[in-house]
Every structure is written in C-alpha cells, then in structure tokens.
Image (cartoon, grey):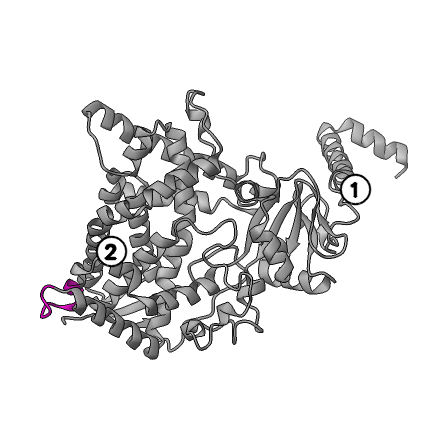
Amino acid sequence: MALLDVLGLITASPTLLLLVSSITLFTAYAVVHTFFIRRLPSNAPPEVRDNVPISGAIGFWTERWSWFRRRRDQSKTGNFSFHAGPNTIVALSGDKGRQLFFDSKDLGFAEGYAVLFGQAPKVKAHDDGEGKDDDLNNHFSRRLTYLLKNEQFRKKLPTLISDTQEAIDAIRDDPTGVTNPFDTLYRIVFRLTIRMVGPDEIADDPKLLEETLQYFEMIDNSATATSVMFPKLPSPAVLKRTYAGTRLYFMLENIIKKRAASDEKHDDALQYMLDQGDRTYKVVEFIVGALFAGLLNSGINAAWVMCYLATSPEWLAKAQAEVRNTASKYARDPTAPLRYQLDDVPLEAWEAEFPVIDMCLRDSIRLNLLGTAMRRNISGKAIPTGNGNEVIPPDAFVTYATGDIHLDPEIYIDPHKWDPSRYLPERGEDKKKSVHGFVGWGVGRHPCLGMRFAKLEQNIITAYFIASFDFQLQDKHGSKLAVAPQIDFNRHSAHKPKDSLFLKVAPREK
C-alpha cells in the first residue's frame, strides 16, 4: 500500500487517528523524558543497564534485593543510579554508603518516604482549609514522643495486658486448637498500637477495630510501582488509597463529634491531640503514620518469632525459663498458673528482664526488615559519596537495601538462618562493624521512635503466649514443620508468608 493510501486511511478513521496520535505523543514523551528530563549528571553513580524509558528500573519493584545485589556488584563503587518513573534514585551500599545514608543531615527521611512509599492518603481536602500546621515529620515526632513517654506506658500497661489476655483467651477457647499467628498475633499488635496512638472507641469496639485494620491494609497495599511512577494517574491503587483515607477521616470525625456532643473527655491519644488543637486531617495523618511505623514490622515479627520458637526447642526452652523466672520474682501468688503470675510483673521488668525474647526478636527483625530504606537529597547541592568525585545529585532520592548489611555473610554467619545466639556477647556479630552493623531499629539521625513500645508489646505478647500454650508449627495441611520456611527476601517490607503457617496449641494449666 502506498504511503498516500495509508495517510488517507488514517485520516478517514477518527479512532485510528487518535490511536496513532497517542502512540506518537507517547513516543515523543518517552524520548524527551529519557534523554532530557531524566538525564543524570556525569559524576552521579553509574546508571544501571535496565533503566528503561518511562517506568525506569522494573527490577527495583519485582525482585528488589536480588536486583539490588546484582547492580551493586556490577558497580565499581557499589553505588548506582536508576529511575522509578520520573524520580531519580541513587542506591548506596557498603560502609561509606551506609554511614552517609543514616548519618547525613542533608538526606531527608520524610521527603524520601513521601514519594517512594506511595504517599499517605490525601485527606486535607476534607478539611475546611484552615489550620495549616507545621512540617508533618516534626508534628509526627512530637506527638509520638509524648505518647510514648514513661508515664503513658505506666498508665496504659494494665490495658495492654488485658487486651493481650483477651486475645490469648480467644485462642484457648477455639475448639480447633489451631491459630494462624499472622492473623491472631498481628491483630493483637494492631489493637495495642491503636491503644497507644488512637482513640479508645476504636480499640474497644471489635467492629470498628476490624474496619480500621481493613482501611489501613488498603492504604498499605496501595504502595505499588504504578502509584509511585505515575502518582497523578487515577489507578486502582491510588483510588483505593484515597477511599481508605477518606473513610478513616470520616470515622474519626464522627468519633470527635460524638465526644463534643456529649462533652465527654477521654484519657487517650485522640484526646491529647484534640487538646493540642490538631485538626481531623492531622489526626488521621498521625494515626496512619504511626500504624505504618509500628504495625507492619511489629505485627509480622510477633508472628514470626513464635514460628521460629516453635521449631527451635533450645531457644523455646530458654524463653520459657526466662518467663518462669521473671514471673516468679514478682508473683503475689507463686502457686497460680504461670499466665496469671505474669499479671504482677511491673513495667520496669517488662522492659529489662526479657533478654532472651529480645534476641529472638532482634534476629527476626534482621531477616524481616526487607527492601530499601529511603531518603531524599534536600540540601540543594550535590552530596559527595566519598568515592572519588561521585555525588548524589540535588533533589535525587536515595535508597539503601538493608540486606547489604543484614545478609552480609562476612558479618552474619549463615545469614539466612534465624539464630539469636549471634547476639550473645561471645559472638556479637552485630558489633563486628564499628558503624551501624545492625539497622533494624533505625540508627544515626533517624532511630526508631517507637522502639521502646515495640519491644514492650513483643515481650508481653511472647511471654503470655509461652505461659499459656505448648505449641508446634504446622502447614495448611496440618503437617508438623521442623523448620520455619525461609522468607522471600525480594519483598519490599515485612510480610506474611505466601503459604499460611499455623500453630497447633495445647493450653498449659501451670
């Protein structure tokens, strides 16, 4: 067919003309975007080979740790550059890279996560436009610091224990004698977290609690590659995130209105934020942020620790002995069943007298803190990486894969294995590096603000579970597992296992 005939056919068909026009515009955009908008400075770390137009490096989303490791090993400095949609990203590795990433005041924490984690739900549109507050990160830190003070822990401890006991009793009363810890224990962590950072109305109402969890998980699942690459595209993930954020906003607004109508005062996190003058959208942002900070890792690790203990007789025996010894030290009735003796353990003991459980949690965190931590160069200038003239460009995002240190076989022996003994003084594998040999609780300029609470709730949940049950790990078919399955290290964050795991429990009476 002659060229004039083809042009005539296109012109005669509006649909075909629109299709050809769209393809032409998309191709032009791809060329401009790739070769002009996204061009990297010559002294940036080398660009990876699979940094394709428009989308960027797909491997960053599909096989994050394996992809990161390959690209790291291909780079002379261990650092490399790529894109996620329009976002320029520099990946750091090694001792210099890790120290720069965690210690530099020029790398913004909130600015990095705001874009690369898919962003929090936009709820400001439901506010009346007034009450503009200060920087979200500072607001979040101030509120969380107050809510996790010692006086708050002491005040909330009886309720945290009561909530845990209630959940343990529900497991005991289940006639199947089987529980999925990634469901039941995950939900305990969710409720305890709401107790510390949200309203009592949600924590006290099973229906509202479940509804809130569904909205949170909807927001969590919205952090997809598409939502990051094309944040303004109304993709299903973006729409779900907006819907969930809106529903949370109206749920909290309703609770606030009911409190105002009844002139009722509560002694909880919501009341504190209202007394500080926080608007509803700020309360939603804080609660969602606190859940992201606390639930994902704590909820998943609470379950994994129990799975690891179920398949490690040596460490289960050590943990059981620790629980018995601590409980008997404070029990007013030493003849009571062990799970009731724990009721008398004071806050100071909950925080300081469970080192075995702490080591069990520590190695679970090492294995389950997956993906990459995120920052952004907010200095307005290029930041040297410490490798020749190599720099992080202004406004570039920066990532560091935790597996770079946590799965380093020169630091952690047999790194894919759960082994709490690696933290015993005689081994001290996490102390082999003088700078940040373990980053599970945050380090440098950004330590985990919720670490103390996370450890407290882990100690409470683990101790009460151990005191209440003998248990073993089994698969969905009911077959006993001698070893906990290895996790998928290519996921972006702590996650529930692909194939469900269960604990067969037998109540303990002593």
Q: Which mark is residue 35?
A: 1
- Position of 51 with respect to 466 (left or right) is right
- Quarter of the image where one finds residue 275: top left
Q: Quadrant of the N terminus?
A: top right
Residue found at x 29% / y 77%: 317
- Quarter of the image where one finds residue 165: bottom left
Q: What is the x, y in percent for residue 445?
A: 52, 49
Residue found at x 54% / y 56%: 371
Residue found at x 36% / y 75%: 311
Q: CA gap, disc 1 to disc 2?
A: 59 Å
Above-or-below relation of 226 to 253: below
| Residue highlighted by disc 2 | 347
Q: What is the x, y in percent for residue 96?
A: 64, 59
Residue found at x 78% / y 40%: 31
Give the total number of marks visible in the rendering.
2
Q: Which residues are magenta?
A: 332-341
At mark 2, the secondary structure is helix
Is residue 29 one of those drawn in magenta? no
Above-or-below relation of 107 to 270: below
Label 1 amino acid? Phe
Name the residue furthest front.
Answer: 434
